[in-house]
Amino acid sequence: MKKILLLVGYKTINYGSALQTFATVKALEEYDFEVHTINLDNLWKKNQIRKLMYCLKNLEFVFLIGSRSRIAVAKIFQSIDKSYNSGYKKRKKEIQRFVNGELVFTKPISEYDQLRDILDNYYAVVLGSDQVWLPSNVMTDIYTLNFAWEHSIKKITYAPSIGVSVIKDRYLNKYKQMIESINYVSVREKSAQKLLGDITNKKIELVLDPVFLLTREKWNTYIPYKRTESEFFFVYFLSGDKKRRLLVKSFAERQALPIKAICHADTYVPIENRIYDMGEVGMSPENFVNNIREAKIIITDSFHCLAFALIEHKEVRIIPRHKNTKYSTNTRLYSLLECLGIDWIIIRTEKELEESMKRNIDYNLVDPIIETMKKDSHSFLKMALSD
């Protein structure tokens, strides 16, 4: 059996990252490949420091203020709130258990260059999904596959996200160099497809996030459906914004439905300790999926929460995580909703939420679009992986 070397950010403590990593491995295995994931244990902290130093040097304050401040706040409250601390440790343990149980790893490496010694053992190297092509990742060569650029091994990207709608001029040459060094390139956003298509002659394919490559029946096999008789709102917010939580709380009370939520998903949000009927910090990926399956209504700002809601035919509404600036990271979410013709589920006020609930997502219209996009995604993989 031929082997694939997979580069994916599996160590992020995030449900979407865990589930898309799982889906990427399963999808590649369905093409009869043995998948070996690059072990990032010794590189993870180095990569974070590399990004931090790059952003400091280049005055990338959006990343510094946003990402690093959330992490700092979370660490402070882990030392103050014992319940949050234990819940976060449980979440980390559960996500690592879920991911590590499915992956076959290479030996740990301390630098990407060390991978050059093992490339001859593999048929292809694949860069996995999610926001791996954010400028801070590309400019620091964390997810560019640069260790394989000069090797004859087949180089493939599956559904990376640039995250932003504009690439600064000073970054364009690096992106062009990366794209032209990869044999088969796909992305998940129309905006990324256009951005990269404008700076290179290489064909850029538009594909679905890997979680869509597995059917609902497959997901039920991998994560058994645990049914309950209760009805509830399921809330999963990555943003630290207080207003969106109060908005949902007010609406849920008028609907006489309890709220089940994952608390402090991306940073510590004190109000979450008291406004939800059923709040949990240390939820497992399996329970994350099952709560989506069971919920009557889902309200989120998470791409992958949206994705699983669509897979499970649920009523879902989106409160965008960022303001609509050209450097916001909403693009992958907007791109999917636009393709499916349901961008009306994006709401920003309680009135908009109430109005949107007067109509339902028509999955008789959505499913055929997803199926067409899924066929295109599989066609890309078949082409890229063929001899």
Image (cartoon, rainbow, N blue to C red):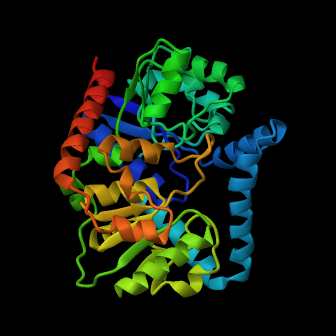
Left or right placement of residue 61 versus residue 31 in this view: right
**Residue 283, placed above or below residue 339:** below
Q: Position of residue 345 (x, y in %)?
A: 37, 58
Q: Front-most of 191 and 14?
A: 191
The answer to whether residue 270 is left or right of residue 367 is: right
Residue at 45%, 87% in the rendered image: 277
Q: Is residue 115 above or below residue 366?
A: above
Using the rendered view, name the quadrant where residue 74 is placed: bottom right
Q: In the rendering, at what x and y percent does residue 229 appear?
A: 23, 84
Quarter holding the N terminus is top left
Q: Quadrant of residue 43?
A: top right
Q: Residue at x 42, y 46 (%)?
A: 104
Most foreground residue, 140 or 36: 140
The answer, for residue 303, to whether it is visible in the render is yes
Asked which quadrant contains residue 51, the reply is top right
Q: Is residue 58 left or right of residue 273?
A: right
User: What is the x, y in percent for residue 287?
Assistant: 36, 71
Query: Foreground: 225 or 377?
Result: 377
Q: Residue at x 69, y 47 (%)?
A: 48
In this rendering, the answer to whether 169 lies above or below 315 is above
Residue at 44% x, 53% y is 303
- How many numbered callouts? 0
Q: Considering depth in this image, is 267 or 351 the residue closer to the camera?
A: 351
